[in-house]
Amino acid sequence: MFSYFLALGIISTIQMADALQSRSIEKSFESIEQQEGINARVRRSIGRQDCGRLDPFLMLDEMMGLGGNSGFPDHPHRGFETVTYVLKGCLTHEDFKGNKGVLNEGDLQWMTAGKGILHSEMPCGDGQARGLQLWVNLPAKYKMCDPRYQELKSKDIPKVEKDGVMVAVIAGKAMGIESKVYTTTPIYYLDFKLQPGASHFQEIGKTWNAFIYILDGKGLFGNVGGSKECSAHYTLLFNQKGDGIRFENNGSEVLHFVLVAGQPIGESVAQAGPFVMNTNDELRQAMLDFRMCTNGFEDANGWKSENGKALIAKLAK
Ligand code: FJE
Ligand code: FE
């Protein structure tokens, strides 16, 4: 009888250890600053030439040192979502339907461009801004949906701290808390901060693609014994072998990173900058619609953002 329970105990212990199997890093690379928009600098994580997309994610940019005469004046989007998260400073936005707003530190805008958005994104005043913009693809049947916004103030983003691990749940769930953001495809977007010495295991769906982009500090990622040390500005791509990802802060400063994971859409992708469709024909139609102000771009006719005009006036001086 005793050995029976002992055996059961050992089996369940093995199963528990098994359940905490971490995925391993398949590839890691550093993002160096590049020019984007007007006088803006970004570090591009996924979506670079040499890395490509990671279905359902198209791009992740860390914007930094915005301010002064910089920003992303009037530009269109179709067929996907942009998720803008401000880490420092503040960002204003304006769109062709009259939507306007300010994103302050910790605020989030989840914009479903659907069939079309024309907008501008600018830092406020002369302040320096730091943030992230993630591009999430939409499945074919939602690419031409009506545009919509989900705006979350910092206080609306659930956060929890335990044993030196702090998480802000932008999308999905972690450490017992859940985001109210609606995502078309199931997605986790988690902002982690670990104190020196802290460690955590984050579960992720078996079939999901996942990556980490490190903002500050350094840490160990992967199974104990088989982990790899990585530091700020590195993107980590993970294999699919495991139920999640284990990480640990082995440095002396705070380790700050975002973990992004999602269920792949599995459709063909045809992209031309801010238009992301399934086929080249749809892409041609998107560019035509933008030029002709049709099929969702009606309000683009003659529209110019106020902050875009202000930037152009400042640059002309
Ligand atoms: C861009 C199309 C775009 N990274 N990070 C083409 F949509 C953009 C663009 C951005 C952007 C905006 C913010 Cl707020 C943050 C970003 C690209 O708006 F730069 C190009 N070249
Ligand atoms: Fe944009």
Image (cartoon, rainbow, N blue to C red):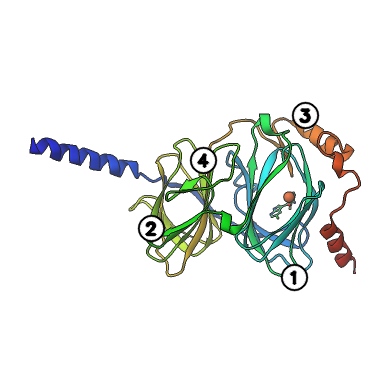
Residue under label 2: 199
User: What residue is shown with label 4?
Assistant: 209
Residue at 54% from the left image edge and 38% from the top image edge:
186
Q: Which residue is mark 1?
A: 126
Q: Residue at x 54, y 42 (%)?
A: 187
Query: Taking the image as drawn, is residue 26 in sight?
Result: no
Q: Give the residue pinned by disc 3.
A: 281
- N-terminal label among 3 and 1: 1
Q: Residue furthest left?
A: 1
* Vertical placement of residue 223 versus 218, above or below: above
Disc 3 vs disc 1: Cβ atoms closer than 8 Å? no
Q: Nearer the viewer, residue 250 or 51?
A: 250
Q: Are marks 1 and 4 in contact (CB under 8 Å)?
A: no
CB of mark 4 within 8 Å of CB of mark 3? no
Percent across and percent down for residue 138 are 65, 36
For marks 3 and 1, give the CA distance.
42 Å
Category of crowding for the residue at label 4, using alpha-carbon neighbours closer than 10 angstroms: few (below 14), some (14–19), many (at least 20)? many
Amino acid bearing label 3: Asp
Going from N to C along the chain, the mark reached first, 4 or 2, is 2
In the rendered image, which quarter is residue 317 located in?
bottom right
Check disc 4 and give the amino acid type. Answer: Asn
Apparent side of residue 26 relative to residue 271 in the rendered image (left or right): left
Between marks 4 and 2, how big is the CA–CA gap?
22 Å
Instruction: State the image coordinates of residue 272 (x, y, percent, origin top left).
Output: 75, 41
Residue 89: x and y, percent? 66, 66
- How far apart, in angstroms, are the residues tagged by discs 1 and 4? 38 Å
Residue at disc 3, secondary structure: helix
- Regarding mark 2 in the picture, which secondary structure is present there? strand
Q: Amino acid at mark 1?
A: Asp
